[in-house]
Image: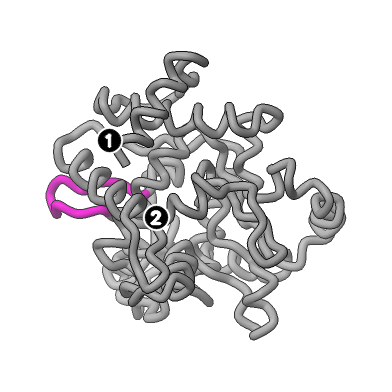
Amino acid sequence: MRKILISFTALALLYGVGSLTMAAQNPKVKQEIANYQNYFLKRFPTVPLDAYSDGVNALPQYAERRANWEMLMEFPPYEADLEKARGMWNKPFANGKTLASCFKRPATKYPYYDEQRKEIRTIELDINECLEKNGEKPIKNLKRGKMALLVAAFREQYNGQKWDVDIDTPGAVAAYEQGRKFYWTKRGQLNFSCANCHVHSAGNKLRGDVLSAGLGHTTGFPVYRTKWALANKPWGTVHRRYDGCNRQVRAKPFKPQSRQYRALEFYEAAISTGVPIKVPSQRQ
């Protein structure tokens, strides 16, 4: 990993540190984010930073399929579900309040480190907390279904705005480091890390599919996925995808909203600073 970070630093010196619009950040973290982003901007020079919100569809190696994806987006398969999600988001509780009454923090600032609780907070956790505080039942399935729809309804309100999570306290930096360690650590029977697929092999083909870039990886979640739609469960949060990735490398997955997955989500949000939110996404 040290060699990779040195490589990123060298790229930043040669090609200039990317222009990052972000809240006050730890200088070391800010440099790492710039190095990470410049790695991709050099590797795929025709893909601007904003385009990474389209995921694998933005990569030149996926060009042969992009036209089909663009045609699909003219009449997105998720539109009816999303309209339903908007209704659920705005539906009053028994006490007259709505989910919106609990959310003063914009989606661009999620996940965030809560200094009082000493933990990373996600939209999913805050949705359930809001429900409980208002006398409603919390949602049990944190990976798909109703929870995914509600997260999509919240995040789509900030489409086009750039991700800008805060990493300006010791606790937030420690959480970022935990997520960074998870991202770069090999695991499972196949001995793969997140970076093996989404940094080193980004743009390469795997069994006919193209591996997406880690940059902007989570800006489109929750996603409507064709593979999941075949089982009539098309919607998934990013933790559902983490679960699938762990299983694919034959590693024991963690529970959704586990400390490990929340740290990973925080790290992925940080390294995608400046990439616009684009929710929901349609993925294969």
Which of the 4 image quadrants contains residue 79?
Answer: bottom right
Where residue 226 appears, x then y in whole percent?
A: 69, 71
Image quarter in which the N terminus is found:
top left
Residue at point 53%, 63% (across, down) = 90
Q: Which mark is residue 65?
A: none
Where residue 156 appears, x then y in whole percent?
A: 58, 51
User: Depth check: 36 or 79 in front?
Assistant: 36
Q: Is residue 6 left or right of residue 159?
A: left
Q: Is residue 5 left or right of residue 58?
A: left
Mark 1 and mark 2: span between their CA atoms?
Answer: 25 Å
Frontmost of labels 1 and 2 is 1
Neighbours of disc 1 within 10 Å: few (<14), some (14-19), many (20+): many
Q: Which residue is mark 1?
A: 167
User: Depth check: 120 or 55 in front?
Assistant: 55
User: Which is more N-terminal, label 2 or label 1?
Assistant: 2
- Magenta-tinted stretch: 111-120
Q: Amino acid at mark 1?
A: Ile
Above or below for 31 versus 207: above
Residue at point 45%, 46% (across, down) = 107
